[in-house]
Image (cartoon, helix red, strand yellow):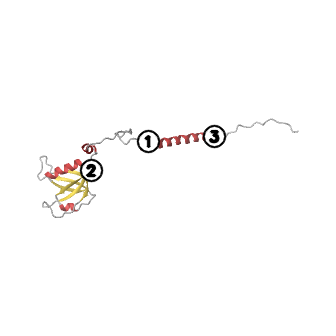
Amino acid sequence: MPEIRGVPQFAPLRVRGGRLRLRRAVRRRRRALAAGLAVTAAALAAWGPRGPADTGAPHAVTAVPERQKERARPPVALVSAPVRIADAATVRLLRAGDRVDVIAAAASPTEDGEDAKVVAAGARVAEVPRMREPSPDGGALVVLSVPRATAAALAGAAATSRLAVILC
């Protein structure tokens, strides 16, 4: 019978990448958690309140008088402003979509020496209506898309001076 021997001595076994596997697993969990939080935040943002007036709480619907409905509408950013330009030949050069500067030229120089000023800068031409008959003053109409305040300035300038355009 063979002689029984003891278990020989072995050097400790080292598994390659053991620490790296643990790090990779933790990193994957962190990424998964971050992705989950990002999806949750996006869902909450999409389904959350839409503005300062909308709190998400249920509210009773009441009838709103017509006057209040008109006040509640947000102001229009751009309006269409019809403007009569003094030189009809210049207006024939314009097309819808062009950008123009509108200049108000006073009939007589002002006290400070200025005889012309820019009333609207970079206004977009919305439409150039066809002339059916020549205007007695030799001008032509053009419709500009401008902010409401600029439209008021254009109307005021048209009442007191002759308007010209510069194609931008």
- Residue 155 seen by the camera: yes
- Residue 168 seen by the camera: no
Q: Is residue 135 left or right of residue 146?
A: left
Q: Residues within 10 Å of mark 2 (few under 14, many from 20)?
A: some
Q: Of 164 and 142, which appears nearest the observer?
A: 142
Q: Residues within 10 Å of mark 3 (few under 14, many from 20)?
A: few
Q: Which dot, 1 or 3, sits closer to the camera? A: 1
Quarter residue 141 falls in: bottom left
Which type of secondary structure does the marked residue at label 2 adopt?
strand
* Place of residue 146 in the rendered image (x, y in percent of width and height, measured from the top left): 25, 51
The outermost residue toward the bottom is 133
Q: Residue at x 45, y 43 (%)?
A: 43
Q: Which residue is mark 3?
A: 18
Amino acid at pointer 2: Leu
Coordinates of residue 121 in the picture (x, y in percent): 24, 51
Instruction: Find disc 2 in the rendering and name its residue.
Output: 78
Q: Quadrant of residue 25?
A: top right
Residue ranking furthest to the right: 1
Mark 1 crowdedness (10 Å alpha carbons): few <14, some 14-19, many ≥20: few
> Which residue is situated farthest in the top direction here?
6
For residue 44, the mark is 1
- Disc 3, SS: helix
- Disc 1 is placed on an element classified as helix
Question: Looking at the picture, which amino acid does disc 3 mark?
Answer: Gly
Q: Does the CB distance between marks 3 and 2 fall below 8 Å? A: no
